[in-house]
Image (tube, rainbow, N blue to C red):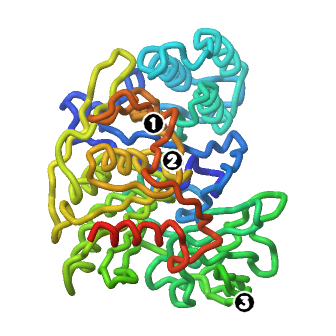
């Protein structure tokens, strides 16, 4: 996973069309003394991997996609503000002090938990202001602000440097552009391998026949996972250069595959196919690993059309087990294919409510046919809310494991130097069971079925087999 970015697949959009005009104007042309812009409707459960900390793997897996962004800042990354000339360490600029103070104030006034998770926020102001005034390099300055937010201990709130903001915006817009083999993976460190989640169409990986659940054991004779960590960066390299992989499909023998790296561009793909159950039902299978690309909802629409072209579907399996969440608008637009109405609300620490409302958009019966959503420990953020509200509304049957418990709503605060803070400011409550706290309990499936992604194939996965059996039982 790239050390230069705060997370792999979870991104966010400033919904300028929903902003009051004054906020939108200030977003486009802020002066350094102005209050930073806040977007009123933003993605919940954004869970960055901070560059300033070492992430611990979850019991099941640590998400570790092949880098889908340049390892150095994008050419479009904003330069330091013209109002802030380079300075020697030991001389914080007025802009740096202003951003620090405004970040501290936003948390003080708007953070979801009024007790700041037991942290003395006033004392932290004194501690970090002293460290700032003692002198920091530009890189150290941005790490300091992220570290201060990390002290809240919610694993969600995060501070991004201008370069990281540019990378985040580029990924959200579906502008993957890197040289590699074209896979998204998840790491299983305890078994010394990474497993393929998605394969980009027309990529070297696709041409070599790699499929979801295939395990990568080594790259050019070097372990892809060892005691030093996960080394998916070894899949990257100059365009046109060969890379040798040791690949193992669950249940099969390891095999060597040689691919030629090339440029991978475009949106994160949505994988789908029609499955035939033992009793002959036509069941759609659709894999959703993110709502962090603004083409995902459109791709889901096209997948539903494609799977229904030959004949109507008898049911649909939505595989949400690797869904790290993403953007409010993308998740809502995807939910609209399967349900509608008020599905729950977000509440801040003052108990002000913001409803999650969806206008239905049926695609070849998608709002009516039986629906199974697969969930697991790596289902977080809007991945959780997506599954949970479908269950709460009685629209879907959930199979798998309890989700990660990460459904806080983050607000985006944009600063004049091009940096950005994501602050947890609201929590989610489902319509029919508002007393449930998914942040604490996760979303609990209707049927618990255990399965390790790297030890099964689509055909042998007990969770998918259980979903097929459930749909057959409805006939």
Q: Which residue is mark 3?
A: 256
Comparing 354 with 377, the one in front is: 377
Q: Relative to 177, is 422 above or below?
A: above
Taking the image as drawn, is residue 168 in sight? no
Q: Marks 1 and 2: in contact by CB < 8 Å? A: yes
Crowding at dot 3, Cα within 10 Å, few <14 / some 14-19 / many 20+, comes out as some
**Mark 2 or mark 3: whose residue is earlier in sequence:** 3
**Mark 3 or mark 1: whose residue is earlier in sequence:** 3
Per the model, the C-alpha gap separating discs 3 and 1 is 43 Å
Query: Which of the image's four quarters has the N terminus?
Result: bottom right
Comparing 296 with 373, the one in front is: 373
- Dot label at residue 274: none
Q: Which residue is mark 2?
A: 403
Q: Which residue is mark 1?
A: 438
Per the model, the C-alpha gap separating discs 2 and 3 is 35 Å
Q: Residue furthest right?
A: 227
Taking the image as drawn, is residue 45 in sight? yes
Per the model, the C-alpha gap separating discs 2 and 1 is 9 Å
Question: Where's residue 461, x and y in %?
Answer: 54, 72
Query: Which of the image's four quarters has the C terminus?
Result: bottom left
In screen coordinates, is 320 left or right of 53?
A: left
Discs 2/3, front: 2
Question: Where's residue 410, x and y in %?
Answer: 42, 35
**Mark 2 or mark 1: whose residue is earlier in sequence:** 2
């Amino acid at each position: 996973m790239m050390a230069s970015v705060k997370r792999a697949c979870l991104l966010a959009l400033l919904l300028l069309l929903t902003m009051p005009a004054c906020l939108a104007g200030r977003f486009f042309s802020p002066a350094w003394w102005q209050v930073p812009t806040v977007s009123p409707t933003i993605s919940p459960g954004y869970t960055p991997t901070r560059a300033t900390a070492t992430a611990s793997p979850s019991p099941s897996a640590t998400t570790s996609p092949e880098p889908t962004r340049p390892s150095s800042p994008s050419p479009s990354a904003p330069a330091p503000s013209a109002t802030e000339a380079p300075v020697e360490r030991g001389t914080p600029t007025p802009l740096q002090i202003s951003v620090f103070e405004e970040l501290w104030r936003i948390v003080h006034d708007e953070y979801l938990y009024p007790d700041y998770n037991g942290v003395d926020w006033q004392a932290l102001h004194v501690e970090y202001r002293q460290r700032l005034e003692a002198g920091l390099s530009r890189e150290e300055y941005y790490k300091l602000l992220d570290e201060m937010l990390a002290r809240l201990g919610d694993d969600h709130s995060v501070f991004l440097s201008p370069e990281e903001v540019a990378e985040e915006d580029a990924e959200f817009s579906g502008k993957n552009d890197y040289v590699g083999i074209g896979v998204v993976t998840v790491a299983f460190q305890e078994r010394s391998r990474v497993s393929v989640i998605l394969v980009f169409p027309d990529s070297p990986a696709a041409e070599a026949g790699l499929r979801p659940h295939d395990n990568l054991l080594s790259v050019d004779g070097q372990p892809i996972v060892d005691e030093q960590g996960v080394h998916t960066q070894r899949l990257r390299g100059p365009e046109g250069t060969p890379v040798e992989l040791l690949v193992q499909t669950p249940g099969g023998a390891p095999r060597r595959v040689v691919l030629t790296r090339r440029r991978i561009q475009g949106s994160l793909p949505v994988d789908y196919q029609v499955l035939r159950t033992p009793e002959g039902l036509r069941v759609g299978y659709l894999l959703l690993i993110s709502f962090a690309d603004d083409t995902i909802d459109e791709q889901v629409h096209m997948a539903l059309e494609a799977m229904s072209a030959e004949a109507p579907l008898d049911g649909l399996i939505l595989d949400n087990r690797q869904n790290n969440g993403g953007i409010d608008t993308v998740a809502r637009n995807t939910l609209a294919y399967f349900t509608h109405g008020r599905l729950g609300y977000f509440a801040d620490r003052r108990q002000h409510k913001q409803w999650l409302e969806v206008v239905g958009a049926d695609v070849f019966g998608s709002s009516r046919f039986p629906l199974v959503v697969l969930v697991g420990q790596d289902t977080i953020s809007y991945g959780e809310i997506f599954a949970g509200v479908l269950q709460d509304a009685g629209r879907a049957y959930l199979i798998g494991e309890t989700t990660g418990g990460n459904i806080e709503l983050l607000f985006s605060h944009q600063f004049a130097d091009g940096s950005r803070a994501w602050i947890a400011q609201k929590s989610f409550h489902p319509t029919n069971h508002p007393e449930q706290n998914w942040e604490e309990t996760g979303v609990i499936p209707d049927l618990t079925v255990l399965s390790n992604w790297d030890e099964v194939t689509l055909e042998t996965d007990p969770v998918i087999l259980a979903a097929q059996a459930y749909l057959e039982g409805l006939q």
